Image (cartoon, rainbow, N blue to C red):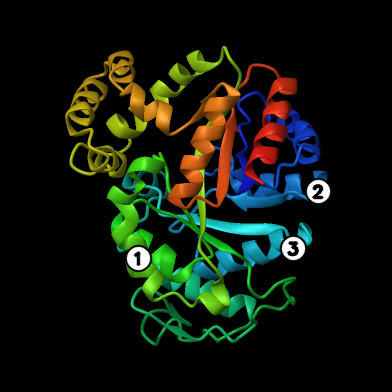
Amino acid sequence: MRVGMMLNYSGGFTETVSELSDFERAGLQIVFVPEAYSFDAVSQLGFIAARTTTVEIASGILPIYSRTPALTAMTAAGLDFVSGGRFTLGLGTSGPQVIEGWHGVPYDAPVGRTRELIEICRLVWRRERLDYQGRYYTLPLPAGAGTGLGKPLKLINHPVRERIPIVVAAIGPKNVALAAELAEGWQPIFYFPEKAGLSWAAALAEGNAKRDTATLGELDVIVSAPLAIGDDVTALRDLLRPSFALYVGGMGARSKNFYYDQACRYGYEKEADQIQDAYLSGRKDEAAALVPAELIEKTSLIGPLGYIKERLAAYREAGATTLNVTALSPTHEQRVKDIETIRSLAE
């Protein structure tokens, strides 16, 4: 398995990036930069590209609604250029709260728009003239939809690669099937190896049946897992409770929350209802306390070395090919050591 890391820059972005060289030397292979409604991911990815030499860089994720398809393709080509061919385009839908509240655009047709965005990006990277007639995107704009002066252009620069890897973050069955069909990689959240099949086996099989493996290769399954290795680190699992409570309880409306649905698919319907009730009533500490210990334990790599080895075996058995870890140990030195250890175990 490949080892990656989600960049956590709560202590300061420049300071965090200055430490990346240590993780790079420890064997880190890819770093993911998120984009929600803080600083954009693109400027930060460019900064990281200039400060590193071997580690791959990835958006984790760019929302599909926040940029036009052509700009997304241009941005990916630009980041691939400044990094010397080290960029992976991570895409996702985000959610209605962010897309409609922050970006002010409708949250509609997530599966169809993702499909067309991927197709358009690959047209741009191949430097074909952008003449695309889709259900959601028509390029150039047709007569009556604008001035009528649009031309089918092609990218001026020659990209480093005409096939930049695309990763789709998805947990809903239709979007998971799309990722397995069209993308180089798939990134779920809260990946519970022993229960992953309950949620995604059918969707992955559906997508893989349509997959052009000769072109795309096997699907890279990128799973997130908080990481801390040691005999006295299990208390760090409780640090994850507020995040689980936020996602299951408050990330979306009561009637539309993808992460609540995911917890239910894992068999935690009762707990998910309780977490959501507490969170939406403002009792966030209570919601965090209600998160099942098993869910935290089995979706993380926190514990003694022997336990970590057992969990890695479970991730392999479930089909994970990239570990996207969040290093939680209290010191930088220990976090670097944890990356070094997990890389050696994952080989």
Using the numbered discs, state the Cα–Cα distance from disc 3 to disc 1 in whole angstroms. 31 Å
Examine the image and state in which quarter residue 339 appears: top right
**Amino acid residing under circle 1:** Ala
Mark 3 or 2: in front is 3
State the image coordinates of residue 281 (x, y, percent, origin top left).
Answer: 21, 20
Asked if the residue under mark 1 is in contact with the one under mark 2, i.e. CB atoms within 8 Å, the reply is no
**Amino acid residing under circle 2:** Ala
Mark 3 or 1: in front is 1
**SS under mark 2:** helix
Using the numbered discs, state the Cα–Cα distance from disc 2 to disc 1 in whole angstroms. 39 Å
**Can the viewer see residue 114 in this picture?**
no
Disc ID at residue 297: none
Task: Give the residue at mark 3.
Answer: 85
Q: Is residue 344 left or right of residue 172?
A: right
**Can the viewer see residue 117 in this picture?**
yes
Q: Is residue 298 left or right of residue 76?
A: left
**SS under mark 1:** helix
Q: Residue 4, relative to residue 170: is it above or below?
A: above
Examine the image and state in which quarter residue 92 appears: bottom left
Task: Give the residue at mark 1.
Answer: 205
Disc ID at residue 50: 2
